[in-house]
Amino acid sequence: MKNYTLAILFLVAVSTGLESSSAEDSISEKPNILVIFIDDMGFADPSCFGNPLIKTPHIDKLAAEGIKLTNFYVNSPICSASRVALTTGQYQGRWKIHSYLNSRAGNANRGMANYLDPSAPTTAKKLQAAGYATAHFGKWHMGGGRDVDDAPLPQAYGFDESLVSFEGLGDRLISNSNGVERAKALGHGEIIPCERWERMQIQTDRTIDFIRRHRDEPFYVRLFPNDVHDAHVPRPGSADKFKTVSDDPYVRDFFAVLEYMDQQIGRVIATIDELDLGKNTLILFTSDNGPTDWPRKYKTGPPAGFTGPYRGRKWSLFEGGIRMPFIARWTGTIPAGIEDTTSIVSAIDLSPTICRFAGVPVEAELDGLDRGDVLIGKASRRDRPVFWQYGHPHAILKGGKPEHQSPTFA
């Protein structure tokens, strides 16, 4: 296996340039936590990670004000499984979600559950019990939608508020091209019809409103944008500016969507800074898996999205499918402009790491490790191997090198 990469841009404020003692002393009690988890964004889609064609100035600014990890791995090259690992700190196989959730028949045919068991040890439940206000805005895809009408709502997993999309239940945004009537038939929450290109702004508006309302108490909020996932539907006319960049209208639409997503992320960060919350807010930014591969599968042209030097994309256990950009910002705790190119961090590590910073006990049952020291500037080896399985291909990363690999990775 040549490349194992976990596609997550994790934004956490870490004092890497300072001595470790001062970094730890600067950690505030019960910091606010914002997790931004992009759908289908490749390792090199942000310009600070190597996008050769367009700029993402707001993501770049976030990286310049915090730490970049270049060895960050998600635990699956596909959405539902990757989200379960991030949400629980456990391998997704424990919960019978090893691929994307589909219809009841599609799940049964692959030996999968229809939704994440609500007994799973989610980060949100732990922080909620510790006094945090909690919310999830954006893609869910851990149960509900299609013909699954009995999945628990996000509130069952520890979220006080939520607004999801068609891959979930509860209050949800449904694009006009994506089955409003079918969503209404499932019930369980308010259905808000919208154009696909409107979703990111609405999700961002809800996130900003939540932050403003809870500025005086600790909050944990997740913004999980959908729009970099195909089909890419930009705001009318916004792709025209990229005609000089690409002759392919599909690629131009992708660039327009990526640019708009960057702008909306900038709005959230600006709100945190405007409210003077930067010194008490840990921001994590990443992606669930590599960039889409559908155009190639449909044989309609090359896919959009960049993986940098890494082979593979979404659906693949090569590094381009699982190695993600990761950024963490925490003003005054993480020194600005730090890049860690040696430490290996996995998405399952984020739950115990967040709990550590929030002062919440971490159960031994978690598969992830507390990697908070890496985020505050102590680069280190990962003592526990990281394991992947997606269908027949599988891989183990131990001590920074693959210990075993399926013939697929030869």
Image (tube, rainbow, N blue to C red):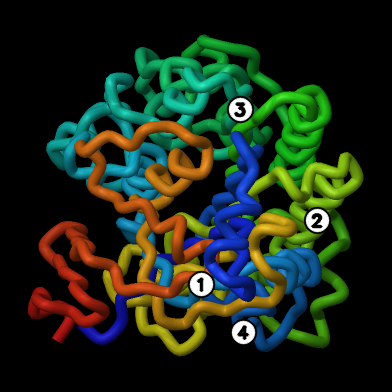
Name the amino acid, label 3.
Answer: Ala
Left/right of residue 319 with respect to residue 375 in the rendered view = left
Question: Mark 4 highlights which residue?
Answer: 50
Query: Which mark is first along the chain, 2 or 4?
Result: 4
Disc with the residue nearer the chain's start (3 vs 2): 3
- Tell me the residue that label 3 is attached to: 135
Q: Which element is circle 1 on?
A: strand
Look at the numbered disc 2 and give the secondary structure of its residue: helix
In space, the residues marked 3 and 2 are separated at their CA atoms by 19 Å
72 left or right of 366?
right
Of callouts 1 and 2, the N-terminal one: 1
- The amino acid type of the residue labelled 2 equals Gly
Which percent across, then down, holds residue 156?
43, 16
Q: Which of the pair 233/16 is nearer the observer?
A: 16
Where does residue 143 sit, x and y in percent of width and height? 38, 28
Tell me which residue sits at (10%, 74%) in the image. Answer: 406
* Residue on which disc 1 sits: 69
Q: CA distance from mark 1 to mark 4?
A: 14 Å
The structure residue drawn at horizontal position 52% and vertical position 10%, both measured from the top left corner, is 187
